[in-house]
Amino acid sequence: MRLAICNETFGDMPLEHAVELAASLGYTGWEVAPFMLGSDAMSITPEQRRSYRETVRAAGLKIIGLHWLLAKTTGYHLTTLDRETRVRTTAYFEELIQLCADLCEGETEPAVMVLGSPLQRNRDPGVSTETAIANAAEVLAPLSASLERLNVRIALEPLGPQEGNFLNTAAEARILKSHLPSPAFGLHLDVKAMSSEPQDIPTVIRQNADWMIHFHANDPNRRGPGMGDLDFTPIIATLREIGYQGWVSVEVFDYEPGSERLARESIETLQRILAAG
């Protein structure tokens, strides 16, 4: 298991300082929210992409992919009944795939795009779960060719009911995945989100080991591992049990403690548990 951190953790800190801090703490991966680079994927120029990639790599970090794919955008939606919006959303995902490939250029390991963004996927009133899943599959299925060609994978992210009303459990995400046979689609698990599942977190991990391709570490209190009451020891033990060798990426939502404390306490918790075996 390798440890990464999401770039929005560092707020307005200059990129050079942020990646140097992350690397000094022991992180080796860097996960990117596109809104930290520009208002949308199309606005991020080739030069900006190259410069960003080189700055992160110069600090000794690897860009592992994107998350918050549709956050802070307008005009895109995954489950809407409006077909024009769905078509437009597919086209925007193509732009995101290219952005992800550009930022990860030269890497042999597949890059990952975590598909959460609850506001841009929530079911409208009267839209059933079955219809929403069918609409989401219609948006995503045409991306298979680009994903496979550019060595990028989309990780479908279940989010708890406090975040939205679509894909609230890993079981629902598996139904959407069943409509997307390409190996470029997999499952993402997030600790905070799993805390609202009817089963305990280790059980959810075991049940979804076959499709899990990415993992976010955070506490139900919206801060990092070790900054709340949740014991991460059985979580890491279960990841080891299933043979997970991907990234464990720290994603927080409450930034009040400050970037350095969030990054430091999170990795110290994870490193201590990993070292204990």
Image (tube, helix red, strand yellow):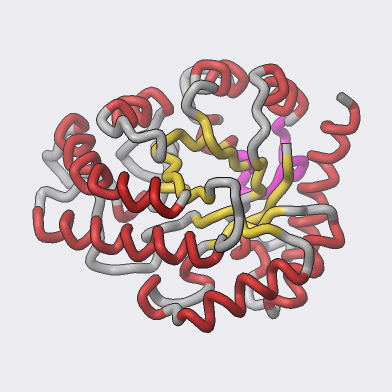
Q: Nearer the viewer, residue 254 or 78?
A: 78
The answer to whether residue 254 is visible is no
Whether residue 23 appears in magenta in the rendering, the answer is no
Q: Quadrant of residue 39?
A: bottom left
* Residue under the image location 59 percent in, 35 percent down: 191
Q: How many marks?
A: 0
Quadrant of res 20 = bottom right
Residue 13 visible, this angle: yes
- Assign the N terminus to one quadrant of the image: top right
Whether 227 is among the magenta residues is yes
Residue 166 horizontal/vertical position (percent):
31, 38
In the rendered structure, the answer to whether residue 254 lies left or right of residue 162 reads right
Q: Which residues are magenta?
A: 217-231
> Relative to residue 117, is residue 80 drawn left or right?
left
From this view, report whether residue 154 is shown above or below residue 131.
below
Q: Position of residue 9 (x, y in %)?
A: 65, 62
In this rendered view, identify the residue nearer to me: 269 or 53: 53
Q: Residue at x 80, y 59 (%)?
A: 261
126 or 202, which lies in front? 202
Residue at coordinates 32% horizontally, 60% vertically from top-left? Answer: 94
Dominant SS in magenta:
loop
List x then y, in percent, for residue 98: 41, 63
Residue at (39% x, 38% y) in the render: 185
- In percent of width and height, residue 188 lies at 49, 37
Residue 182, above or below 148: above
Which quadrant does the C terminus fall into?
A: top right
In this view of the protein, which residue sits in the foreground, 171 or 244? 244
